[in-house]
Image (cartoon, rainbow, N blue to C red):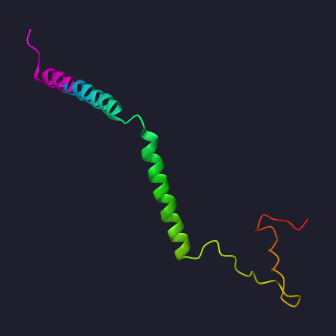
Amino acid sequence: MPRGRSTFTKRQKEQKRQQKQRDKAERRVQRKQEKPEGGMDVGVDEMRELREHAAAQAALFNVGIEEEIPTVDEDTPAATPRPSGPWTGHSRE
């Protein structure tokens, strides 16, 4: 008994999906084999470059230079207290 058109297209679609999975698995295995044994060396070089770049950026923006932090004078008002009440969710207890 012949199959209908929809059955044929479903089979074609399923076969295409399975082939795609096989191709994907094959590419994954190939990438794994091509991966260099000393893969960490590439990462170390990249990290060194990133550190050098970060140091250059820090130098541009003078990061790490201690600046004088202004002290609070006696006559400078202290921080304003937070409002309290039923609408803030805080109580003064």
Q: Is residue 75 magenta?
A: no
Q: Is residue 13 above or below residue 59?
A: above
Kindly identify the residue that appears in the image at 50 percent across and 69 percent down.
Answer: 56
Percent coordinates x, y for residue 78 in the rendering: 84, 82
User: Up-down: is 19 above or below 49?
Assistant: above
Corner quadrant of residue 82: bottom right
Asked whether 65 or 10 is in front, the reply is 65
Query: Where on the picture, by quarter, is residue 65?
Result: bottom right
- Find the residue positioned furthest to the top: 1
Q: Residue furthest right?
A: 93
77 and 42: which is toward the camera? 42
Q: Is 10 part of what is drawn in magenta?
A: yes
Residue 31, percent from left and from top: 32, 34
Spot the residue most to the bottom.
75
Relative depth, front residue between 27 and 86: 27
Which residue is found at the position 46% from the left and 58% from the top?
49
The picture places residue 48, in percent across and down from the top left corner, at 49, 55
Q: Quadrant of the N terminus?
A: top left
**Residue stretch rendered in magenta on the structure:** 1-15
| Side of 19 where 72 appears, left or right | right
The quarter of the picture where the C terminus appears is bottom right
Q: Residue at x 54, y 66 (%)?
A: 55
The residue lying at 22 percent from left, 24 percent from top is: 14
Whole-percent x, y for residue 5 in the image: 10, 23
